[in-house]
Image: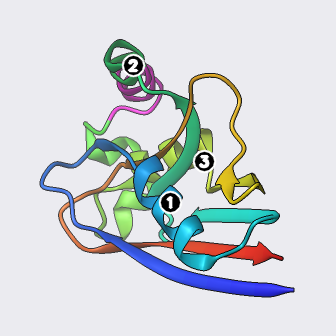
Amino acid sequence: MKSFTEYLVFNTKTRREYINITDTVEKLVKKSGIQEGLCLVNAMHITASVYINDAESGLLQDFDDFLERLAPHAPVLNYRHNRTGEDNGDAHIKRTIMGREVVVAITGGKLDFGPWEQIYYGEFDGGRPKRVLVKIIGE
């Protein structure tokens, strides 16, 4: 069995952002040379997410609106976590809702998606570099 690892780095300009990383991950699958296996993509920070869904701008805004209603950023003192000097209690909750990672099968050297599936990086506390691990294993 072969293994391939690469780290992606994101440094968003805004606090919340949703980035389609499907093309990048597909290029890494090709670079790995693995034809049959699994691809793990996970956010390595507790205020960011990796998830799979449709690449539709209205849906992205719906996610953002929903998450902000569920866990609004302000007022920051509503979160006990922020009493430690942080201001990202909401981002931790948003990450938990959207998830940490995805695993996608690799078949015939390509990501084996269902219709409309795309991989997204979700940032909920941007403004500094954050890593995403891409780990590909198989034959």
**Can you say whether 28 is above or below 110 in the image?**
below
Residue 118 in magenta?
no
Q: Give how far across and how far down residue 74 sits, in percent.
A: 25, 37
Q: Which is more foreground, mark 3 or mark 2?
A: 2
Secondary structure found at label 1: helix
Looking at numbered disc 2 in the image, what kind of residue is underneath it? Glu
Q: Which mark is residue 77?
A: none
Q: Which of marks 1 and 3 is nearer the N terminus?
A: 1
The magenta stretch is 63-72
Dominant secondary-structure state across the stretch colored magenta: helix
Labels 1 & 3 near each other (Cβ < 8 A): no
User: Which residue position holds label 1?
Assistant: 25
Q: Which mark is residue 56?
A: 2
Q: Give how far across and how far down residue 97 sits, in percent.
A: 60, 39
User: Which residue position holds label 3?
Assistant: 96
Tell whether 128 sits left or right of 96.
left
* Residue extending farthest front: 108
**Is residue 43 at least partly visible in the picture?**
no
